[in-house]
Every structure is written in structure tokens, then in C-alpha cells.
Amino acid sequence: MRRRDFLRGGAMLAAGVGAGYQIDPTLLTARELAASSRRRVGDPFFRELAMLALDSARGAGATYADVRISSNRNQFVSTRERRVTGLNDSETFGFGVRVITNGTWGFAASRDLTREEVQRVAQQAVAQARSGAFARLRPLELAPTPAYPEAEWTAPVEVDPFDIPIEDKVALLLQANEAALSVDGARFVNSFMTFLRQEKFFASSEGTVCDQTLYRAWPTMNITAVAPDRSDFQTRQSTDIAPLAAGYEHITGNDLPGNAVRWAEEAVAKLSATPVEPGQYDLVLLPTHLWLTLHESIAHPTELDRIRGYEANYAGTSFIFPAEDYLGKFRYGGEFMNVMGERSSANGLSSVGWDDEGVKPDDFLIVKDGVLNDLQTTREQAPWLADWYASQGEEVRSHGCSYAQSWSNIQFQRMPNINLLPNPERDVGLDELIGGIERGILIDGHGSFSIDQQRFNAQFGGQVFWEIRDGKRAGMLKDVAYQIRTPEFWNSMDLIAGESEYWVGGSFFDGKGQPSQSNAVSHGSVPARYRGVNVINTGRSA
């Protein structure tokens, strides 16, 4: 089979899968299936179903109920060297009903979008809540939130990625692969693009009705260079192109073929780089790297469910325990350090108009002037911090951190976009950070990492490492990783760059929960300088 024929066949298959929702035909009549396949979230028919679910839940005894009808379309295109290795285009569509009965949560979901089924599922959710009430320690209390009866929000995208033919995406990836392989020493290259369009219709028994559309897009490459004598190999990932809540313009605007040459050249250069000598170094961490350290050592430890022990999957709980002993007292870093949680930035992966329990998220400072100031909350969690908010003269309200990856999952606390804000006093440039170092290392791009069960001790690698000598970049290093204890590390940060150096990284796949769910989150930051950090050589064996 010729490559062109394979691509055409793969595209037709993918398009065929993507054209219809994943609805079990045995659950629907032919008329209903035909009707559902033509409808989109937000259609008046689904509003009618949502109201029917809420009425059924209240009729069965629920004191609160919400319903989410959503569709998730995912597309993944992958290549290696000069061939296609994967095509997937899928869509899932259904609804979930969450209730409170006897002060206890209940949840049920179904892909059968009929009037009879939404009533049955709503009653099933109420029955589930009743059955779990025996284990309740105290009744659920929800922080108040205004009702939004006609809310709408759409992520600001220019080009819907699902309007672009798969053949065009494959052609661009193969062109980028060819550019990377044109560099002497570059032997292997993997590349992929992945996209998500998520449509959500939410309604609650408190009067909020919300219709939203979210997008995500991410291209990435991984290039491997091999030494001529095969004694070493080095890789370079495209970590300076982050996933964003954007359309296909994020792909076309980042010149994959052009950047592929640079990434390949850096992979080859790492082969002859100097292995790092272990020891204490001053570090300058670029935002392409720092977002991950921020994610693991600040963002995850300030999830309130993790702090309270309700979440321990994916690297444990949090050293911030009990929260009352840390809020307003724990010094994370210097007075210039401010870390904000938000879901309002234009291309933030966690940005929404309303969260998955109908709360309009606010911008809030998790670290204020270097001190722990607030935590990530949902409506259920915010009352846990009532005393702290009262002491600060603030109302008890959720920060809007509820999210579920799909209609079939119950919503729970997920991370908003969490950003290290620029220097509040002046626009410090990268050269000034480097200029203040006699012996140090600059790290560009995120790499491997490891962290303990309370997110207190950790180790981080990177993509490209530059030695700093007497305030200037010297040669390239390799096999670099640094080790931290979270409080000491952030308190060793003595200077951060200004607004002109701000850059947004993030994770397209951030796991949490049991059963696990995936979310996406962005982390903006600026280059930052740290003093006396322990660096190890990962290439040495014991």
C-alpha cells in the first residue's frame, strides 16, 4: 500500500469514528438515535432532559442536584521518522447526575439520552446517596454561590482543529520529522498532535444553567541523537511549545519544521556536552522548566482535598497539614514571591467561564508576599476554611476548582491555572539573573522528576543545561538534575524576572483521583534565580 493510500484510508476511518457519538444503539430507539446524533450540547432538547433530571432528583428526595450533559471529542495523530504510527478520533457523549440526599453525595451517569433514562438515573443517584448515608461523619455543607440562569462561555480559538483534515496534520508532522533528520547525528524522531473539544451543558437545582465549549491543542516532538560510535545517545523534547487552550492556530503559529532543526542540533550538541560535576550550584530556571517544579511543589500541595487526606493518589497527600497551622504563617519564599490561582487567562488549559458545579471562578493569591495565603477549593471544601476566611475578613466562597473529565465521572477538586507572578517592582531581564552568578547552571525545558508522598523532597531534570561562569553562559552540560526540599528551595530564590519574560507552560494530561481522571492545567512563570542548590550527575552509576 502506498503511503498516500494509507493516509487516505486512515483519515476516512478516523472521520467515520468521529462522525457519530459513542452511543450504544441497544439503549436507544432508532428515532432517538437519529435525533441524538444530530444534536449538540446546548440544544433545547438537552435542556429539557436536564430539567427533567433535576425534577426527578428533587421528587425522589434530593435537597440539591446538578446535571452535566457533555461531549468530549479527542483526536490524536502520531508519526515516527517517515511513517504514521497512530490515528485516533473518538467522541463520547452522555450525562451525569449528582445529588445530595441526607447530607451525602450520590452520583449516576448514562449515555442513554432519553426522558425515561434521565429520570431513572436521577433516582439512582438519590438511592446511592441514601445507601451511603450510614458512613457519613457530618452532613455536607456547600458554600453559597450566585445563580447564573443563562451562562455561556467558549474558549477563544481562531481555528477549530477538527475542521483541519488529518492528511494536513500528518503532512506537517512528517515535514517536521524530515527537517529534524536532516541534521547530522539525529537518528530518531517521534512527533504527535493531540486535540480536545469539550462541550458541556450544566444545570443545578439552585437555578444555574450554563453552556460552555472548551478546546485544547498540543503539538510535540522528541528527537534522539546517537554518537557515531554508539557510545551515547541524547534526546531533546519540544518543551518550548506548551499545550494551550487554543485552536489549530497553535500548530501553524509555532513552525514545527523550523524549530525541529534547532531541537535536533541541541540533541546532537548534548552528545559532546561536559558531564556536570556534582555539588552546590546557583541555578537559573527558565519558565519552560520551572512550570513543572511549580506544579509539583506548590500547585499539588495546595489542593485542599490532598491536604485533608481525601486524595492520596499520584504522589500522595501534602506537607501542608493541618492547613490551619500553615495559612498566614508558612513562608514559601521571599516577599517578592506571589503565586496566583486563576481560570480566566486567555489560553489557560484550566480556564473556564464556570466550573463543574456552576461557580464562576475568581483569581486568588495562594502565596502572597511569600507567605501561604489560600488554598484550592470547591463548594464543599470552602466551609472547611471558614475560620481562616473570617480572620481575613473574607467571605466563604469556592474558588471554582471543580472539574470532571467526562460526563461519566463525578466532579471533584482539580487544579486551576497556577502562576508564579513576575517581579512586582521592576522588569528584571534574564541577563541580570545570569549576570549575578559566578558558578551556576541555566536549565531550559522540563525533564524527568521524582517527588515524595508529601511533596516535600523532590528531584528535577531538564532538557538543555548551560554552565554559567562569571555572569555569562559558558558551554553546554549534560546529566544534570537538582534536588530540593520545598521550603528551602523556594526560599533560596533571590530574584525573579519581570513581566516581559513571562511564559506559560503546562500539562495536557494531569492525573488525579481513584478512579483516575485527567485534567489539563497551565502554569505561567518567569525565569528565577536560586542560590546553593544541590546538583547531581544522573549519568554516573554507583
Image (spheres, rainbow, N blue to C red):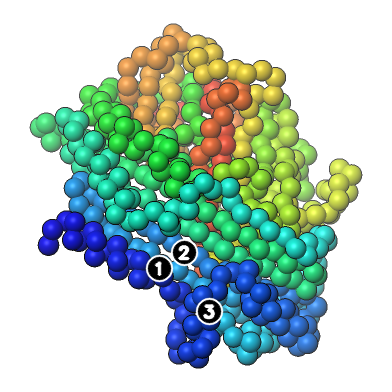
Pinpoint residue 170: horizontal percent, then vertical percent. 29, 51
Location of mark 3 (residue): 36
The disc labelled 3 sits on which kind of residue? Ser
- 362 and 227: which is toward the camera: 362
Q: In the image, is 339 to the left or to the right of 28?
A: right
Residue found 23% across the figure and 49% down from its top: 80
Pinpoint residue 350: horizontal percent, then vertical percent. 59, 50
Location of mark 2 (residue): 73
Q: In the image, is 249 to the left or to the right of 173?
A: right
Q: Which comes sooner in the sequence, label 1 or label 2?
A: 1
Confirm or deny contact between disc 1 and disc 2 (CB under 8 A). Answer: yes
Extreme residue toward the left, this view: 229
Disc 1 from disc 3: Cα separation? 14 Å
The disc labelled 2 sits on which kind of residue? Arg
Confirm or deny contact between disc 2 and disc 3 (CB under 8 A). Answer: no
Residue 331: tell me if it is visible: no
- Taking 58 as reference, is 184 above or below it? above
Where is residue 381, by image quadrant? Answer: bottom right
Looking at the rendered structure, the secondary structure element under dot 3 is: helix
Residue 29, disc? none
Label 1: few (<14), some (14–19) or many (≥20) C-alpha neighbours in 10 Å: some
Extreme residue toward the top, this view: 470
Residue 18, disc? 1
